[in-house]
Image (cartoon, rainbow, N blue to C red):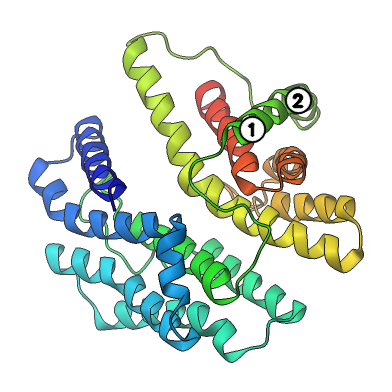
């Protein structure tokens, strides 16, 4: 519980800086803050073992009900604050969350059921169904990201606390060895990234901006941790923590699991920015190999999260 006030403080500070950067009126940010803090609380609880242990003491149906109610709470807070409440949107979010939360209450813990679960989670994610239920009240005030965060935590909670998946190494803060493994595989990836980028004509690198060096450094650091705790955590959980493990077990080969999970990871980027984005598919598949190697060595997604976050941050700094 000692960390929770720091999470709230950090979230409020991030919201304040974000509002200054994109010139969002302060009163709008204040109206959005309760929903943001509510989601930050639930998202933080996902990474704390003692919170998950309390949830796991409930009967599976009770735990699934808690997850479903927690999924719609941030929408209710945001919708009431900004006046865009719609029963249909609430019902869609509740139905999506209930489907994910009760999946392993109603269905057996078997391989085919696991695959269908991941396909369902991915389909909603790629179609942005959970995000489209929110209304963004002001340019750059993207409240729909609350829907994305909800979807990540609901799926992860269902797997960790109801399906009781092991061997994932789930958590927000990597251990010292995991930082080292993640950074090492990022360094190993760089020459392969350069070769793959040259082969598929993947953009042109540029020097980072030097104007306002302190500001740029702060934004880069913020980008890294934002990617680490949201994008990398969600994608590494499903692609390395689940798919790579499952495929390796089914095919009795860790290397085939790594290879096929990397290919699937690449294909998941087919819709990024433009369809079909084969350049991004190729780059993501190659990167996925190194994320998978980091996970395989550390036996923890925290290590692959570091490799992933360093890769995305470098891309944003030098290619966008």
Residue furthest to the left: 27
Horizontal side, residue 62 vs residue 167: left or right: left
* C-alpha span from label 2 to label 1: 16 Å
How packed is label 2: few (under 14 Cα within 10 Å), some, or many (20 or more)? few
**Residue at image x 91%, y 57%?**
253
Horizontal side, residue 57 vs residue 308: left or right: left
Residue furthest to the bottom: 106
Any part of residue 129 in sight: no
- Against 196, is 119 above or below? below
**Residue at image x 62%, y 50%?**
236
Residue furthest to the right: 252
Task: State the residue position of label 2.
Answer: 188
**Residue at image x 55%, y 21%?**
318
Residue 147: % across, % down: 38, 63
- First of labels 2, 1 by sequence position: 1
In-front residue for pair 210/76? 76
Q: Which secondary structure, mark 1? A: helix
Any part of residue 241 in sight: yes
Horizontal side, residue 189 vs residue 142: left or right: right
- Against 227, is 195 above or below? above
Residue 117: % across, % down: 63, 75
Task: State the residue position of label 1.
Answer: 177
Dividing the picture into quadrants, the one containing residue 188 is top right
Residue 5: % across, % down: 23, 47
């Amino acid at each position: 519980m000692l960390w929770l006030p720091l999470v709230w403080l950090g979230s409020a500070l991030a919201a304040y800086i974000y509002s200054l950067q994109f010139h969002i009126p302060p009163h709008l940010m204040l109206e959005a803050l309760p929903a943001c803090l509510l989601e930050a609380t639930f998202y933080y609880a996902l990474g704390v073992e003692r919170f998950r242990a309390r949830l796991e003491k409930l009967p599976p149906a009770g735990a699934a009900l808690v997850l479903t109610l927690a999924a719609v709470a941030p929408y209710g807070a945001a919708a009431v604050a900004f006046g865009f409440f719609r029963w249909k949107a609430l019902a869609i979010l509740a139905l999506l969350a209930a489907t994910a939360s009760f999946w392993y209450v109603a269905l057996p813990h078997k391989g085919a059921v696991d695959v269908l679960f991941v396909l369902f989670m991915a389909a909603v994610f790629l179609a942005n169904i959970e995000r489209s239920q929110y209304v963004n009240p002001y340019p750059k005030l993207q409240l729909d990201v609350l829907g994305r965060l909800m979807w990540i935590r609901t799926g992860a909670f269902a797997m960790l606390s109801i399906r009781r998946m092991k061997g994932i190494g789930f958590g927000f803060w990597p251990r010292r060895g995991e930082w080292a493994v993640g950074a090492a595989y990022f360094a190993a990836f760089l020459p392969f990234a350069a070769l793959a980028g040259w082969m598929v004509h993947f953009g042109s690198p540029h020097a980072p901006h030097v104007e306002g060096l302190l500001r740029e450094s702060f934004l880069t650091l913020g980008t890294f941790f934002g990617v680490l705790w949201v994008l990398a955590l969600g994608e590494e959980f499903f692609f390395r923590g689940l798919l790579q493990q499952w495929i390796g077990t089914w095919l009795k080969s860790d290397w085939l699991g790594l290879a096929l999970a990397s290919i699937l990871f690449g294909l998941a980027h087919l819709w990024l920015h433009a369809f079909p984005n084969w350049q991004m598919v190729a780059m993501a598949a190659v990167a996925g190999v190194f994320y998978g190697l980091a996970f395989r060595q550390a036996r923890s997604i925290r290590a692959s999260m570091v490799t992933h976050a360093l890769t995305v941050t470098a891309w944003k700094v030098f290619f966008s």
